[in-house]
Amino acid sequence: MSKCKKYFTFDQLLNNLTMKSRYLFAHKYKPLGWFLFLIGIALGIIYTAGGEELMKIEMKVFPLYKV
């Protein structure tokens, strides 16, 4: 009745990956999610297929440490 270590490790991993309903949005937000997903895909395709730099963002940031 002994089980290998991989079985227990994999079993624990699967238990941690199950979705918990309290973290999910209500079903009424599904169209909004699809809309945002499709806009993101379209902008990603345009950005990668454009060939030139579409958005160039320059800003100063606070350094956490000196090199």
Image (spheres, rainbow, N blue to C red):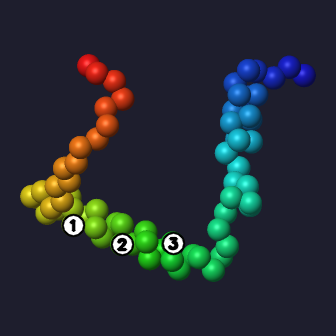
Label total for image: 3
Calculate the distance from the C-alpha at mark 1 to the C-alpha at mark 2: 11 Å
- Look at 22% across and 48% down and name the residue there: 59
6 left or right of 50 in image:
right
Label 2: how many Cα within 10 Å (few below 14, some 14–19, many 20+)? few
Name the kind of residue labelled 3 in the image.
Gly
Q: Quadrant of the C terminus?
A: top left
Q: Position of residue 36 (x, y in %)?
A: 43, 72
Calculate the distance from the C-alpha at mark 3 to the C-alpha at mark 2: 10 Å
- Closer-to-camera residue (49/25): 25
Q: Position of residue 66 (x, y in %)?
A: 28, 21
Q: Which mark is residue 33?
A: 3
- Look at 36% across and 29% down and name the residue there: 64
Calculate the distance from the C-alpha at mark 1 to the C-alpha at mark 3: 20 Å
Relative to 55, is 2 above or below?
A: above
39 left or right of 14 in image:
left
Q: Secondary structure at mark 3?
A: helix
Mark 1 vs 2, N-terminal side = 2
Q: Position of residue 1 (x, y in %)?
A: 90, 22
47 left or right of 21 in image:
left
Name the kind of residue labelled 2 in the image.
Ile
Name the kind of residue labelled 1 in the image.
Ile
Q: Which mark is residue 11?
A: none
Which residue is disc 1 drawn over?
46
Label 3: how many Cα within 10 Å (few below 14, some 14–19, many 20+)? few
Q: Which mark is residue 39?
A: 2
Q: Position of residue 20 (x, y in %)?
A: 73, 55
Mark 3 vs 2, N-terminal side = 3
